[in-house]
Amino acid sequence: MSKTTTDREPLPAAAQGEAEDAAERLTTAPVESDGPTGIGAFGWLRWMWRQLTSMRVALILLFLLSLAAIPGSLIPQNGQNQFKVETWKAQHTTVAPIYEKLQLFDVYSSVWFSAIYILLFVSLAGCIVPRTWQFVGVLRAQPPAAPRNLTRMPVYAAWRTDADAAAVNAAAHRLLRKRRFRAHLDGGAVAAEKGYLREVGNLVFHLSLFALLGGFAWASLASGTGGKLLVEGDGYSNTITQLDDFTGTRFYGQDDLDPFYVKLADFTSKFQSKGSQIGSAREFTAHVEYYEGSDSSKLKRGTIEVNHPLEIGGSKFFLIGHGYAPVITVRNGAGDVVYTGATPFLPQDGNLTSTGVIKVSDYGAKDGQKTQLGLSGFFLPTAPVAFDRNTGPRSLFPGDADPALVLNAYAGDLGTDSGLPQNIYQLNTKKLTQLQQDGEPAKARLKPGQGWTLPDGYGTVTFEGYKQWASFNVSHRPGNGIALVGAVAAILGLIGSLFVQRRRIWVRAVALPDGGTLVELAGLGRSESAKIAEELAELAVDLQDDAPALDDESAESAESDESDRSTTEADEASAPSAPSESAVPADQNSKE
């Protein structure tokens, strides 16, 4: 083996065109147009279509889609938690109307978000379809025939041998097939190609993005979410009348809810009790009993934790909130029980200082007139010995170390008989009068088991104890599995497109007029890498068993013959630089 090319002079125009054409055929990416072609509107439309289906525009749209999803993570969404949305609006009254007009509370179903991913859909489809057909055509065709002048390739090696030219070509074909190249022997040369997984990876990546967007689109069209707050011991059937709220889509409405029953049997909450992170949550676990359909004999038990939902049928149960529900019994002036049960109070801070109201609509008559009773106050899981006058009742710890209930009492008309909707966590005091005791507003601080005798003969209030409640998000999203598969496939496709190199190798063995055979090897890679040079060197070494190189004197003669032949073939071009003494092929960018 005696000849290896390294750094070379600039290629002539014909040779450059030949190398460029070969390099372009290493990919099936569509050629982009620099400007509109054709005449009139049709030319502009064709140019716009090419721009839309280009990789550059697809990446811009993908970036815009990621950017557009940011508000959906920062601003509460109607489809996830309607209560948080209403709370946010109440706290930001100035910008809330603007956000409403911009659809920032419904980002993922907004017009502008839909426009971005629809355009991305079209862009990917317009890129994938023609590129796939081109790639299928490449797979069905034979590897490109060897160029006439192999010395112009980036990696090249040659030597002279006494072996028969046909035998050398057959041996090279066999060795390349053994190395899993697609090899073709024709016209006294072997053409081989490898690395199709690179293009497969590109196509898989694009198809995966298509599947990912398709999964999101299907989820937005056929998904639904509902909310439900359950107190320990309570259950509900998954119907529209028993859900606290529900948001459906075009293909998933209230008649499509998955039939099941869920009961919150018990709730476990644990908090850090000492150290610098005192009060931090350590465990939130909801223990539930459930069954699908209407057959209660198939009762099952399960647990729901934060970020660990329970799947029932086609829906998932997510744990999103927790708090306390004081158990209160109210008796009227006659001693009749007019209200009893656990009433959820909503947390207001990290120590679960909770506020709530009790509406006694069926209190009865007082002094011959129909009267209703309202109670509002705080539940403190760990109450201080005395309240701060500036801050009022505040809990010291989120755990139930020393619970207390602070109440105020009102009498009058609650407005529950007006037929208008009301917030069950707020008390409208417009038609209510706060009860007075000793000339001051009536109030009481109660421990579990204690009672409070209301002034003016309105009866008694007993703090029986408390339970814990948990709020759940019931989500039905059929496109999540498609999106997950698409995301995993996109990562695998990206890995294949980045780490697999597409390359070609040509071997030509030609009988010389003065006897012997000239063996030429050349390689072309999709990217500048030492891998093609290494493979060519390994192939040259393996070929020595079938085509051993002659001694140095004969090799120098072969070099001279090849140099003369190259000069004759390229008489209009500058002659290539002198060959290196190394027997190992190298890249044209090699420093050797």
Image: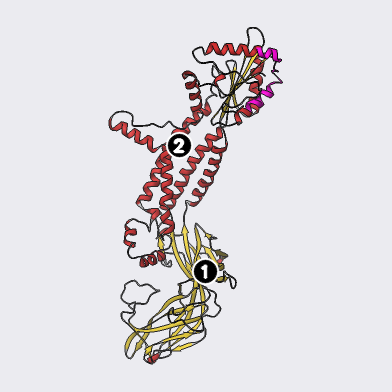
Q: Is residue 439 above or below residue 466?
A: below
Q: Quadrant of the N terminus?
A: top right
Label 2 belongs to which residue? 128
Label 1 belongs to which residue? 263
**Is 8 or 264 nearer to us in this picture?**
8
Q: Say which quarter of the image contains residue 564.
A: top right
Disc 2 crowd, CA 10 A, few/some/many (<14, 14-19, 20+): many
User: Mark 2: which amino acid?
Assistant: Ile
Which residue in the rendered view is the most extreme toward the top?
A: 514
Disc 2 element: helix
x then y, percent, for residue 386: 49, 84
The question of residue 542 being in magenta is answered with: yes
Q: Is residue 217 visible?
A: no
Q: Is residue 247 left or right of residue 520?
A: left
Q: How many marks?
A: 2
- Tell which circle, 2 or 1, labels the residue nearer the N-terminal end: 2
Q: Is residue 536 left or right of residue 389?
A: right
The question of residue 79 being in magenta is answered with: no
Q: Say which quarter of the image contains residue 150.
A: top right
User: Mark 1: which amino acid?
Assistant: Lys
Disc 1 element: strand
